[in-house]
Every structure is written in structure tokens, then in C-alpha cells.
Image: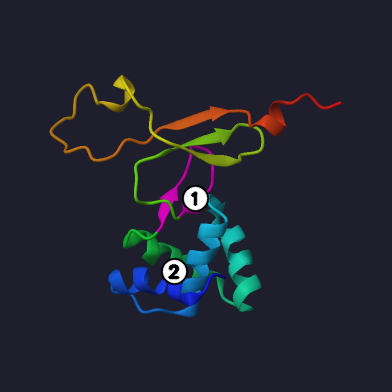
Amino acid sequence: MPPASEFEPQLREARLRVTRPRLAVLGAVRDHPHADTDSTIGVVRADLGEVSHQTVYDVLRVLTQVGLLRRIQPPGSVARYESRVADNHHHLVCRSCAAVVDVDCAVGTTPCLTASDDHGYTIDEAEVVYWGLCPACSTPSS
């Protein structure tokens, strides 16, 4: 886990108490972006020792609510978490192994990101998921 001081200001700015589970979860998600809850629990336990599933679920929920983490759930996948929250980016998902990587927003003309009818909504984010095969899964095995 990184030094506690790295995440303390973020927690305090979000008006959250600084706790070991919150620090551990922030570190785990930062070091393992797009990890699911069970993987995050494993990383947190390796850092803190015994910690309950419920504690990690609660911390993930709270950190997502205050905007310190982002929850993503590509269709057909379990929820995953990431700490890249300061921009509107998208994801590329491997159809074979389910690996997820970040993809920056397209530049230039992007008609698919502009709703044809906003139905009166004030749109502040567009979510695009690209699907394909990662390099490891698209390489024929010998």
C-alpha cells in the first residue's frame, strides 16, 4: 500500500474519515485498475490481514458515491472499479479473457457521442465500450 499520506487529502476533502480499510481499498484499486470486488478484497487482505467482505463492499460503495472511485460494469461482466475519475474515458474489453483497458475519448468528429435527441436531459458523460480480442487472445497458439 502507498504511504497513507497519498490518499489522506482525498478522503478529507470528501469529508470522510481516514481509515485503514479506505486507504487500502484506494491503493488496491489504484494498483489494480478494473479489478472486480473479489480481487480487490484479496489485495486488501494481503495488505491488512483479515477484513470482511462487507467492509470492502461498503468502502467501495462510499468511495464511489463521493467520486473517488468509478464503478464500471461492461455488459455480461461483474462490477469493476477504477481510480481514474477525473475525465470521461472509455474501455476496451477482450471478448475472450475479459481484460479491460482504458481508452481515451476520440478526438475530432465523434457523432456517436452526441445524442440524436437529448429528451431534455443535460448530458454530462457518454459511455462507450469497445469490444474485441486482446493481443494475447488474438495470437494463434502454436
Rendered image: mark on residue 79: 1
Residue 77 magenta-drawn? Answer: yes
The residue positioned 61% from the left and 31% from the top of the image is: 95
Q: Quadrant of residue 135?
A: top right
Give how far apart the Cα atoms at labels 2 and 1 are: 14 Å
The residue positioned 52% from the left and 71% from the top of the image is: 24
Residue at label 2? Answer: 59
Give the residue at the far left of this rendering.
Answer: 120
Q: Give amino acid for label 2.
A: Val
The residue carrying pointer 2 sits among few (fewer than 14), some (14 to 19) or many (20 or more) residues within 10 Å by Cα, namely some
Q: Position of residue 100 (x, y in %)?
A: 56, 41
Q: Which residues are magenta?
A: 69-82
Name the residue nearer the viewer: 57 or 28: 28
Rendered image: mark on residue 88: none
Mark 1: secondary structure? loop
Q: Position of residue 132 (x, y in %)?
A: 58, 27
